[in-house]
Amino acid sequence: MKPTATSHPLDPITPEEMSDISLAIKHYTAKETDIKLIKFMTCNLAPAPKKQVLAFLGIPIAPGQKPEPAPGSIARRAELDFIDLVTGDAWNCFTTLTSEGWTVDSLEKLPVGVQPQITVQELILAEETIRKDPKVIELAAAVGVTPEQLHADGWSIGFEGRFPESVRLQQCLLFARYGKDENLYAHPLDFIPVIDSNKMQVIHIDFPAHRVSSSNTLSAHSTAWPALDEDALKASGRERIPPPLEHHDFLPDLLAQRPGYKKSIRPPVKPLHVVQPDGVGFTMNGNELEWQNWKLHVAFSHREGIALSTVTYNDQGEIRPILYRLSLVEMVVPYAAPEHPHPRKFAFDVGEYGMGTQANELSLGCDCLGKIHYLPGSYIGHDGTAIKVKNAICIHEEDAGLLWKHTDFRPGGRVHSVRSRRLVISMICTVANYEYCFYYHFYQDGTIELEIRLTGILNVYLLAENESGAPFGTQVAPRINAQNHQHIFSMRIDPMIDGLSNSVLESDIVAVDAPTGSAENFAGNAFYAKETVLKSAKDGARLFDAEADRRWTIINPARKHYSSGRPVGYTLGHIKGVMQPLLGKPDSWAARRASFATKALWVVKEKEEGGRSRMYPSGRCVPQTKDAPEDSVGYWVKDEGSIADEDIVLFLTIGVNHIPRPEDWPVMPVEHMRFNLRPIGFFKENPSLDVPSALDVHSSAAFADHVNGVNGINGVNGHTHNAVEPGSCCN
């Protein structure tokens, strides 16, 4: 095994390294342990200490100081989880790359009940398992479904108290597919198997209760789960329900077969090309990217998807650190139907599955437009070899409208406008029925934005004849119920605003107390930002106050703006529209496991111990937890000590409530949500003053002859006959 050379200490583990690491572990366990059969679950870079990385890259850790002396080398380490398939035990392992190859540093058996991330292979095997199970085949046949028509979405089990902690579980949401490529979600089945994911065996089958059409009361006597030894169908209080048979397709060739559809299809959209004749404006050195004064490292993570690190800005020759790391570290999707087993549906799509493992291979001209640079991704398979995602991350530029403009309205006054260009780093992930599209935007004015777009297919369950989906869902098509749910995301922001010693300033916009007519507020118009610096760890769990337009700013008290005299900082912007807390009860299953979703912002002091940092707000191992583990954000805020002027980490909770619409079926139009990090007193003035104003000579009037409201022919690029001539952006 030859050591693999990488150009950056945060470069992800390569496919070749994964093979070498897994082989080293197999040799070690064969020689030193009784482990006989290994199923590899995860493999990721164990990050080097933050100060070592910054010194290696020449990034200062305090304002006005030179970078720390660079280390001669930085150890390259990897962390893995695997399962002993003979015993079912889960193990954690750290390895280090040496001149002799990869060596095992530590091997630890995880406590009973602690389960590593669910793998893509397990999700696929779940479908194969239910198709072979005699009881599932019998139950499907009773409602007219053959084994070949059976399809399953493997899901995490959520919360379950009826099975031994040692059993690795999945629940299988079942559907029938009656034709090749047909929308299987149009035909949900009325039972939900539970499988042992290590043995790949069905161990139980649940039947959800339904609501009696005449009274909308539940067919079962309770929303609680029945005992394992009860007759599950009898406990549901209803008869079997066959799946709805009507087709609801979205693929064009299948849509064309719908009676009458061809008559209603709209005409083709005329081409709109993104052209960069001189090439792109960014450069890549491996995973390191530079664009318009920005410099950062872009990495694929099996868990986070995109991980952005060591983000700096060249401010007129001064390299100024802004973020050490920015990534999506958790999300939870709790569903609202109270009857068992639907409350088990609150998947942690990051912690239980991993966004990177669900990443799409992106296509030129479809997922990204223009001149594109792709980065690959890879994650470990059960056998220890890498599963590769060819075009996992897309990097390109977009026109972003106006950057700034002003017109002197006086006679003879000048106008100047500058168009905005933004850099886009994106990934699209498919988690069973849903698609999540992540877009990190970098702007020329120093703003960083994350946009999340939600699309895909609603998670649905069937209804009986004349049954209503209300009040916990919407009947989006006959007998197809889409249940209410939330999408709640946790963004990890590891700041280094002009260095590692940062604080968080909380601001509420409030009116002054002095009444109208008073000497202090005669006109009654005065308001201001009431500010508080979060100082102690116990202050780190924050709620959002919409009425006060609460906002948070990450500041460095050691550096002040030359004019305002205030600390330099970056504020969390555009959060008002995405502040959505968990709606479940404080002691609900979801709240117990996803405590991060109960607060809008968490601020904790960073700690690097044992090759890990404070990374995952619901813990490192999420599947089948009953409560938030000790390595989760709710425990971190119980620390003693300060979070002011320290190396801190923020976890921002953003989300959306989804009350499904019929228009969301059979495939959902994109829904947008976004927030940004915006400089506030960080720069001396508008940092985009030096962006040149450029006239696009290819723009033209849409209609060359537009007379008396009559549209003429299309204009030609740059010039039009009897139409507006191209102007200047600065006349």
Image (tube, rainbow, N blue to C red):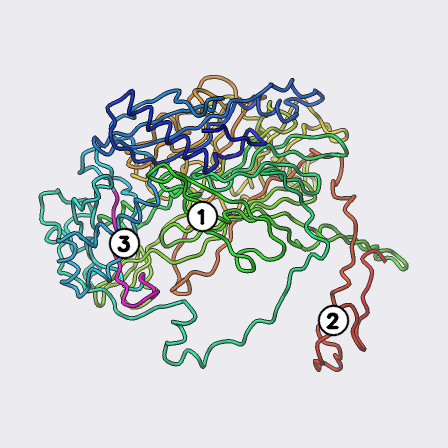
Q: Position of residue 598 (x, y in %)?
A: 40, 37
Q: Earlier in the sequence, mark 2 or mark 1?
A: 1
Q: In this view of the protein, can residue 582 be seen by the observer?
A: no
- Does the magenta portion include 175? yes
Q: Using the numbered discs, state the Cα–Cα distance from disc 2 to disc 1 in whole angstroms.
A: 41 Å
Which type of secondary structure does the marked residue at label 1 adopt?
loop
Occupied quadrant, residue 714: bottom right
Q: Nearer the viewer, mark 2 or mark 1?
A: 1
Task: Determine whether 501 is above or below 11 in the image.
Answer: above
Q: In the rendered structure, which amino acid carries the disc numbered 1?
A: Ala
Left or right side of 111 for 499: right
For mark 2, what is the residue? 701
Q: Using the numbered discs, state the Cα–Cα distance from disc 2 to disc 3 in whole angstroms.
A: 53 Å
Q: Position of residue 62 (x, y in %)?
A: 65, 22
Q: Residues within 10 Å of mark 2 (few under 14, many from 20)?
A: many
Q: In the rendered structure, which amino acid carries the disc numbered 3?
A: Ala
For mark 1, what is the residue? 359
Residue occupying image coordinates x 71% and y 57%: 277
Residue occupying image coordinates x 80% and y 57%: 729
